[in-house]
Image (tube, rainbow, N blue to C red):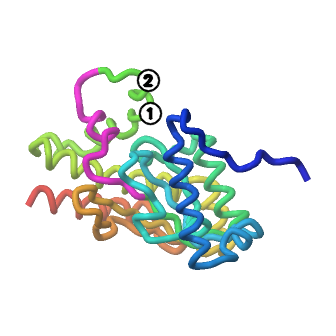
Amino acid sequence: MAARLPPSVPRMSDILAHLIENNRRWVQGITAQDPEFFKKLERQQRPEYMWIGCCDSRVPANEIIGLLPGEVFVHRNVANVVLTSDLNCMSAVQYAVEVLGIRHIIVCGHYNCGGVNASLEDMAHGLIDYWIWPIKQLQRKHPWLAGLDTPRRRDATCELNVVEQSFNLAECKVLKRAWSEGQEVDIHGWLYDVKDGRVRDPVIRIDRVGDARTLAASAEETIRRRHCP
């Protein structure tokens, strides 16, 4: 067995010593409830859920849905974008579906998302512009967005983005192969609200028997009607 580094010993000169101390207290709290927790965690990873979310620091996957380490497999990026050309995301999805046997994949966006907000601005932001380009295209796909005031346009785009990324996930080779082989994997599109910590009603759900394109179109129309009564 390869040698491992010993647990870090905080030094007073270490400006991050408080974080290491937080880790000590966290471990103590977990083991006080279940002394065997980390031994069991080391032996096996078998989560039922995968979370594809934004890397915003205000949106921690485990805490939002009240799950412990080992209970949710997490992939995060700016604005919870799912691209079949993104090898990082696709590798994570493949591992989750084919190795871990994940049953549910949650694509979770959040309101007041910096990436979504940036996509709505008519200005250059640098490298991030390449990443949020697919979100920017939602304005062309849904021209009714232009008639909304800024706060409502941001909220609607966050919702549409979750639908779009959920559809992209349903169209990837990993999911298509799993579904063709009869594997039960459902996609759930969620929105998290930073202002009150609550997950809103799902905007879309896709399973192996539903038509992803029809479900996405229906979800988009529901969003349009809600914001353009």
Residue 63 higher or lower than 136, as above or below: below
Q: Which quadrant would residue 107 be assigned to in this image?
A: bottom left
| Front-most of residues 186 and 34 | 34
Residue 90 relative to residue 201: left or right: right
Residue 142 forms part of the magenta stretch: no
- Tell me the tag on residue 214: none
Q: Amino acid at mark 1?
A: Trp
Q: Amino acid at mark 2?
A: Leu
Expressed as whole percent of the image width and height from the top left, the position of residue 90 reads 61, 48
Residue 177 relative to residue 113: left or right: right
> How many marks do you count on the picture?
2
The residue lying at 14 percent from left, 57 percent from top is 227
| Front-most of residues 2 and 139 | 2
Of the 4 image quadrants, the one containing the C terminus is bottom left
Q: Is residue 24 visible?
A: yes
Q: Which residue is mark 1?
A: 131
Residue 41 relative to residue 132: left or right: right
Local packing at callout 1 (Cα closer than 10 Å; few below 14, some 14-19, many 20+) is some
Expressed as whole percent of the image width and height from the top left, the position of residue 101 reads 67, 70
Q: Which quadrant would residue 154 be assigned to in this image?
A: top left
Q: Which residue is mark 2?
A: 127
The residue lying at 32 percent from left, 60 percent from top is 192
Expressed as whole percent of the image width and height from the top left, the position of residue 179 reads 62, 69
From mark 2 to mark 1, how far is it between C-alphas? 7 Å
Residue 153 higher or lower than 126, as above or below: below
Magenta region: which residues? Answer: 108-123
Label 2, secondary structure: give it. loop
Q: Are marks 2 and 1 in contact (CB under 8 Å)?
A: yes
Residue 121 forms part of the magenta stretch: yes
Label 1, secondary structure: give it. helix
Local packing at callout 2 (Cα closer than 10 Å; few below 14, some 14-19, many 20+) is few
